[in-house]
Image (tube, rainbow, N blue to C red):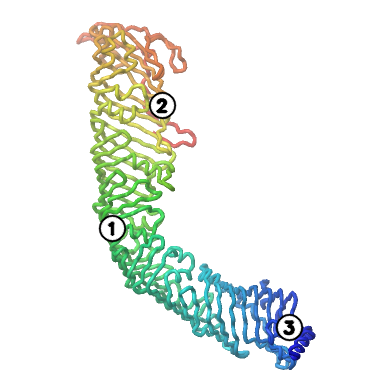
Amino acid sequence: MLLLGGLGVGLWLGQERIIGLFVAAINRQLRTTVRVGHFDLSWWQEFPRVSVSLYAVRLQGSLPQDTTALARLQAIHCAFNAWDVLGGRYSIRTVTLQRGAVNIRRNQAGEFNYLILRPDSASTEPMRFAVEQMRLQDVTLRYADSTLRQAYTVQAYDVKASVEGNDQQLQLRAAGPMQVAGLRLGPDTYFRNQDLLLSTVLRVDRARQMLTIEPSSLRIGEATYAVQGTVGWAGPLQLDVRAEGQNTDLPGLLALLPRRLQRPLAAYRSGGQVYFRSAVKGELSARHNPRVDVQFGCRDASFYHPDTEQRIEHVFLTGSFHNGRLATARTAELRLQDVRGRLGNRPFSGSLRYTNLRDPDIALRVAAELNVADVLRFHPVAAVQAAGGSVRLKGELKGKLRAFRQNPARAALSATGDMQLRGVSLRLRRYLAVPLTRLSGELLLRRNDVAVTNLSGRLGRSDFQLNGLFHNALAWALLPRQPLHVEADATARYVDADELLRAMKAPAGKAGAVTRAGGLPLPAGVDLAVNAHIERLRFRRLRARAIRGTVNLRNQLLTCPQLTVRAAGGEATLRGTVDARRPELLKVSAVTSCRQLRLDSLFYVFEDFGQDFIRYRQLRGQLTGTAEADVYLNAQLEPLPDRLEAEVRGSIRHGELLDFAPAQRLSMLASREQLRHLRFDELTNTLYVQSRTVYIPEMEIRSNVRRAAVIRLTGTHTFDQQMDYHLTIPLLPGLRRPAFDVAAGGVVTRSGPEVRLRVWGSEDNFRVGPERARPDASQGRTATAATTAAATTAAPSPTTAPAPVPARPRSWQAPAPKPKKPAQPQPGEYFEF
């Protein structure tokens, strides 16, 4: 006890001398400066070891222009044996680094910043460094190499290392828990945030500048990775390192890879035997890469998604990767061979060869019989809400991918395969608001084209069957902005156009929410030439049958050369175009002809054309005629009446007018019972629609009213439901005799005494009265009298014809509309007629 006490007193009394010797030894050993907050000497905590402690230490690196410190530590403890004090010699045997960071750097010239030690001092020095053991406690180790674009960051929690050897040969043993924050190689970071248990033996040959890694192990979770090899830095970095995984699984292997590689498979788990072996050998520098060889695979393994518990079982795989004899991306090759397994008790197999990462050359073979629901449970797709049915797939793909991307039509890409669908159903979350069900048929892939044979299914309540050829289908599916040309025959027994348009205009969003889309969604890069046959079609009130025709689509311009349809008790033929190149302004140009369409059905289908003046319940008859129209619609597919122009030429046979309010005002001509049910002979006229107004030229109406057997009518009706009709009713139709009328261009019938009436006002508030001067300047008509009587003349003889009498224009007669001419668009508008 007296000896120990005396030793302690001696150390306490001599601590100034010991610290001074320690500072002198540091100055002799180091080439760079060290800044220390304060020193301390401790001998009682780990007696018989005495330690000199440095606090708030900053050690500068050996690169003169480097401003980053080599080390920043809260404390460094350097220990020696207390009994050395009696001999007057102090040998530092252990060094402990606590709570800080060590930064090792290599600049663009290949110089390191850790060359801070001078040659060892002579053995006669009273204090020298003979470190046999090191300890790192909560120390971050960083390595950055500017020439190779590499950076490593490791957090050592409590790593113990022992050092043996001399100045030229060192052997380092290290063991302890660590965390790898990341090993960055170029743009990718490996081993991100991985906890590991290190056990390694390293031998350093300073003369040969060689590091030898004896068989060492890194334990990450349940997996153990064995590593051994050599690293030489005499000149460019030379690597000869081998690694092998034991007890590995899919999540453990994926965790070591960069996020861009692990993200698609990060959620999956594995069982069974998964293995890999790798070797890296050669020069690693800015100009050269080492040779990399990796063998991997699995034997009777299983992979599953933890959320759905869907498994791929009995998986066998043999794979390899190497970067070729030149160790470059152009000579690299990835192979997957003898791939086989079962998904949902259905088999699949295949192989893959992928060479030349710069200009990829691929050879893929796949054969599978899959249940679509099992596939989506194993690999969920965000856009697909539910799916079912079965798919049988077999195909091969060989060729250059870059050439295919640059010119798919001429690329030497060999693609063959076929896919058979049986009862496939899909419900998408956003892109289509109605489900696709009962999808069956066959698809044949030949190079870049896909042939569709008897592909049938249901889209909501609608059904379809398709046969055709999809040109450039592979490029359109795999590459952006590629065109697709379709030649097909499509048939359907029933089409619900209301449901399909709602699905196209308002795709389902989150929780079934509906958001409106602008315009008619016609794809810009798709060309169609489809022969269509629809047995029944429903659109709003329309119930159409036997729809046949051809539909073409090119550059968002939809054309229909000929389309026939049976509806409203008759038949109609349509040809026209739909221009959807501007979503905010959709243009429809159509020429329609119809035969024996029932008027009441026609008005019912078109919802009385948006007016209440005359309803479908008040009309009977059969319409035959033609119509030409230019219609514009906005982004919500609503018509723009200001831009509508149309010309309608037609005749109505066996017409009837029931309970028509203006007719009830003509009680001076017939009884109310007759006026409630008016019957007409054939009516023929041409109507014009322009500037929100319907123009009705003069026409004769022959009715069942005896006193008004012949009525002449003309007038206008605006889209604001303002009407202005003029009627001429002969009082003595039996006294009519012919007269020559120049305005009519020939012999016409001139009436005797007649009554002229006017119907004007709105649908809800209209008046019927005798024709007279109209002071209403707001309607743009001059105030003239309407009391002219028709002059009667003698009938012309066969040999001498009387001189033609110029027809005097009637003031009440509505002027015939001028022929259509190109409309002048306003600034910012786009339309033409």
- Dot 3 falls on a residue whose secondary structure is helix
Question: Disc 1 marks which residue?
Answer: 390
Alpha carbons under labels 3 and 1: distance apart: 79 Å
Image position, residue 180 (x, y; %): 54, 72
Q: Is residue 711 left or right of residue 91?
A: left
Which of the two labelled residues, at mark 3 and mark 2, occupies the earlier sequence position?
Answer: 3
Disc nearest the viewer among 3 and 2: 3
Dot label at residue 27:
3
Disc nearest the viewer among 1 and 2: 1
Question: Disc 2 marks which residue?
Answer: 692
- Up-down: is 196 above or below 630? below
Q: Is residue 272 left or right of residue 797?
A: right
- Dot 2 falls on a residue whose secondary structure is loop
Dividing the picture into quadrants, the one containing residue 574 is: top left
Q: Name the residue at 40% across, 53% down.
A: 383
User: Crowding at label 2, few (<14), some or many (≥20) Cα neighbours within 10 Å?
Assistant: some
- Dot 1 falls on a residue whose secondary structure is strand
